[in-house]
Amino acid sequence: DDLSQTGELLIRGEDVIDDRIFENRADIAVLAIGIEPAEGTEQLSQLLNISQGPYGFLLEKHLKIKPSETSVSGVFLAGVIQGPKDIPNSIAHAESAAAKAIALMSKDFVELDPHVVVFNPAECDLCRLCEHICIYNALEIKNDKLNIWI
């Protein structure tokens, strides 16, 4: 039977574990390469306080309802920062993120989170506890000195 006349594809490969050649008939073949998060994604995740999934990509607020939003107000995701995507999907997410950013910037004012850093130097013994629990990553201890970003 001639596969070129039926329109089917014949996929030939080698199973290196069983040391054998195999063949499979298919209607379509999709070739893909593995993808992993870009260098610096973990640091960006920590800096912006955005969760990462099990493979290290950044997580959206809700996969179906808010696919370009994050848990951080005003920070939007698009493209493969969320994981492997094809080009049309990347473009759709980019359009969504851009539309949300434009909507945010077109307002006369933006309500900010009312939380502020409060620090009492008399009570600080540089235990680093605050450095690890601050959800805003607003402080850091370097050279036995506490630095706070407001």
Image: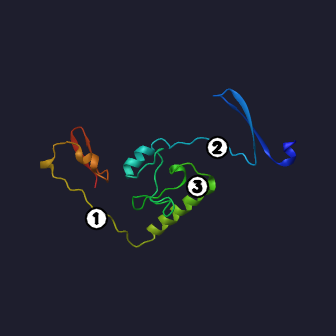
Whichever of callouts 2 and 1 sits on the residue coming sooner in the sequence is 2
State the residue in front, 99 or 65.
65
Q: Which residue is mark 3?
A: 90
Q: Image height check: is 41 above or below 67?
A: above
The amino acid at mark 2 is Ala
Residue at the image position 50 percent from the left and 43 percent from the top: 38
Place residue 72 in its image quadrant.
Answer: bottom left
Measured in 3D between alpha carbons, the distance from the residue under mark 2 to the one under mark 1, in whole angstroms, is 46 Å
Residue at the image position 85 percent from the left and 48 percent from the top: 6
- Look at the numbered discs 1 and 3 and tell me whether their residues touch, using CB distance below 8 Å: no
Measured in 3D between alpha carbons, the distance from the residue under mark 2 to the one under mark 3, in whole angstroms, is 16 Å
Secondary structure, mark 1, is loop
Q: Which residue is mark 2?
A: 32
Measured in 3D between alpha carbons, the distance from the residue under mark 1 to the one under mark 3, in whole angstroms, is 34 Å
Residue at the image position 72 percent from the left and 45 percent from the top: 29
Return the residue found at the far bottom: 108
The amino acid at mark 1 is Pro
Residue 40 x/y as whole percent: 45, 43
Residue at the image position 47 percent from the left and 58 percent from the top: 76
Label 1, residues with CA under 10 Å away: few <14, some 14-19, many ≥20: few
Q: Which residue is mark 1?
A: 114
Q: In the rendered view, does 68 fall on the left or right side of 86? A: left
Question: In front of the other: label 2 or label 3?
Answer: 2
